[in-house]
Amino acid sequence: MATIAALKHSTAVSALDGYFPGDFYCELLGPDKQPGRQIAPLWHTLETSDLAQLRQRAADAERELFNLGITFTVYTDKDAIDRILPFDVIPRVLTADAWAQIEAGVKQRVQALNLFLHDIYHKRQIIKDGIIPADLVLGNTCYRPEMVDLDLPCGTYIHINGTDIVRDRQGSFLVLEDNGRSPSGVSYVIENRHLMQRAFPDLMQGLKVRPVSDYGKRLLGKLREVAPAGVDNPCVVLLSPGIYNSAYFEHVFLAREMGVPLVEGRDLVVEDDRVYAHTIDGLEPVHVIYRRVNDDFLDPEAFNPTSMLGVRGLLRAARAGHVTLANAIGTGVADDKAVYAYVPRIIRYYLSEKPILANVETHICREPEGLAYTLANLERLVLKPVGESGGYGIVIGPKSSKAELEEAATKLKANPANFISQTMIDLSVAPTLIEGGARPRHVDLRPYAITGKDTWVLPGGLTRVALKEGSLIVNSSQGGGTKDTWVLTDET
Amino acid sequence: MRLLSRNAEALFWLARYLERGASLARVIEMQSSFGGHDRETGWSWLLTLHSDEARFKERFEVSAINIVAFYVTDQANPASIRSSIHWARENARALRPFIPLEMWAQLNSFHQLVEKISADDISPSRLPRVCAEIRAGCLAQIGVAEGTLYRDEGYQFFKLGQMIERADQTSRLLDVKFAQGTTSTQAADPADDFVFWSTILRTAAAYQVFHRLEQNSATPERVARFLVLNPNHPRSIGFCVREICEALQILRGTFRLSTGNACLEASDVLTDGLLRASSDQVLPHRLHEFNDWVQRALIKLTAEIGTAFFRMSMPSTDSTGSPQPNASRKAKRSTKTQSQSQKQS
């Protein structure tokens, strides 16, 4: 017996054998490419872990995610298939200093975007002052004239926001995108942490990681803050498109964490501009709706008339001030890819502050200079259609063939206003467990900010990882996975 | 906020589908173990029992393997075990914010098992074991609910669905003899008769207790009375009806739901019918007629529960003025399916 055990031990491969981040910024090793004091215990645990064992534990953990139904749903022609978001066991670690910058930057950005939304639905001063072109705002498909002159509790439009942040070769944080409609993914942040604590408690030893499990409680608190005036004990519900929605698990998760009912459109009815839910004891009033149904489907009376997901009269109720919708209708104009380019100017305009988090260098193809520059440098830029999400339609110059670049140029010339281009960022990497061991894979970060009277940012956020070697596309719909994100406390 | 009507309805149907899957597994297990597979037509009474002959013959030739496939694995048959478990899971999915995670996790694993049942698995040699697994999976879900589901209004709707379906299934079981083509309970050979009714008892999980109480006298009369009237056997109709009445009383009393009066009246009809049956000397001879009455009374009760507690959740019209697609309710075997209309791109 002893010999077999010894033999096994001698052939064991460390999980970190062969990890080399190359020229990229490594999230775990930092600028010195050496395990620093703060992450030393984690590095040591990984170094002394047997690769095969760690991979076995990782596979068990993924099976658990499936059995618990922590899944998103992918549609094929025939079936709805539940998939888990692949989970990587090696966490992404953010130091207290790095986090302080992200937190302050996200708060600043959300504050500016809320002021921007209030302005464009009221006096439109920013347009009058020539900071942003009128047609970009008023001609935007996400602009909702129905919201004009409506005052919202606390002036908050974007109650729940997700900011997509990347890190370049130097380790600087840059904002890639704002998500101010219905950002998803926060449930994975918390479930990943729970999974980590259950299945890999050894990895956490020696580190002080800030908790994430109070998100539901905080969210409910913020939603109660924005209840219609005069409602003492507001009834908060989460409105979901239902079990066939790809993010249904997240809706369940959030309703459960907040302890509020998950409703579908057919559960609600508007009478005399007030919203009620059908219960076994008749109608009960509803005051705040965290809605995960898009603007278009929210109210067949006001928007898409064929919607079966919405509630007839909801806009009327919102306009009458009897119900608060979170996020508000019409926030899409603030997270539009074209408006994104103006956010640094928006921050300066409303807050008279320098942006704490910079944008990725962005060229607006609707502007002649932007178009000319983009066409001239297409092979080294990332071209993005402004109307798409989920990573679709993106052309990555350095990774495209000549034919692909020509096709992109044709599309761009046909409709320049539909595109922006950005400097190619060499995204940071983090060690990610694959068959042969830990290998560098590109990551991004989506912190979640919730806003009522003021803003709170969940420590960390969703780290998405492009599991394919060299890939920069981290979206779950295109083969991305996730990592637990650890924000270290100061005293670590 | 009080329980959403839609959640109450989903709890009711979750339990019904589980109970339905389990009962069907029991009946198929009985036939495969004791029915003798030599006669190809030995299975066709199953079609009679569920009034499925026409539906079946539209698609298949009558053969043992086709009938088994129709009731176990056929996705297109809404009454198959596979469909029942599928719809149980869909209802549970809608209930995920409400039910304990343990219920969902068990049902999710069990659903995977049922989805994987292959043609080989339902071959005569393996069928009994597969049926036993299905039975155990359904019972496990009901057990997890018993052990973890909070005892508020929602639990009463779960209980109602479970007991209404179980009473219905037991009344069908008592009708097997009729479905097999013998209207008289007096069989030609008393030995055959004994074997038959012992099998019925096994299927109703009552074999041991019946013999303990009745000292080995499985006459048709005694078995019928036991499964109709016994107040303590969890699968007898009498037991189920008592549980139904209790759940409705709790909804009205403890939870102060005043809308359930018509439901209580409909359950009183069942209680009254059972009382009359207990003093009916010729009950075993008019068993088919009685079963038919029980099943109709249960359908009426289900409709009253729907009106009182669930229907409110369904707006009468959508934006185009046409009725919402919702449950397809067939005359004899009611089914509830989640609306597919909510698919979003």
Image: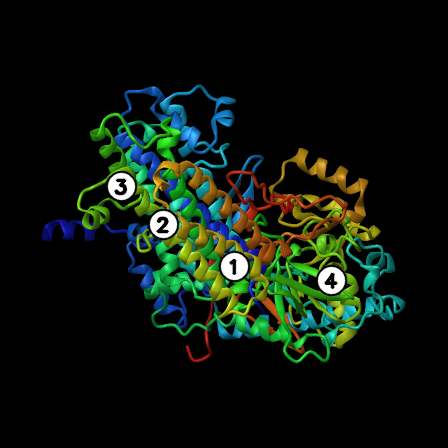
| Viewer-side label of 3, 4 | 3
| Residue of label 4 | A270
The residue carrying pointer 1 sits among few (fewer than 14), some (14 to 19) or many (20 or more) residues within 10 Å by Cα, namely many
In this rendering, the count of numbered labels is 4
Looking at the image, is mark 2 or mark 3 earlier in the sequence? 3
Looking at the image, is mark 1 or mark 3 earlier in the sequence? 3
Amino acid type shown at disc 2: Ser
Label for residue B202? 3
| Viewer-side label of 1, 3 | 1
Does A297 sit above or below residue A74?
A: below
Amino acid type shown at disc 4: Val
Give me the C-alpha separation between circle 4 and circle 2: 51 Å
Please give left or right for residue B209 compared with residue A161 in the image: left
**Residue at left offset 78%, top offset 50%:** A365
Looking at the image, is mark 2 or mark 1 earlier in the sequence? 1
Q: Nearer the viewer, residue B94 or B204?
A: B204
Give me the C-alpha separation between circle 4 and circle 1: 31 Å
Please give left or right for residue B104 compared with residue B345 in the image: left
Residue B281 at x, y percent in the picture: 34, 44
Are callouts 4 and 2 both on one chain? Answer: no
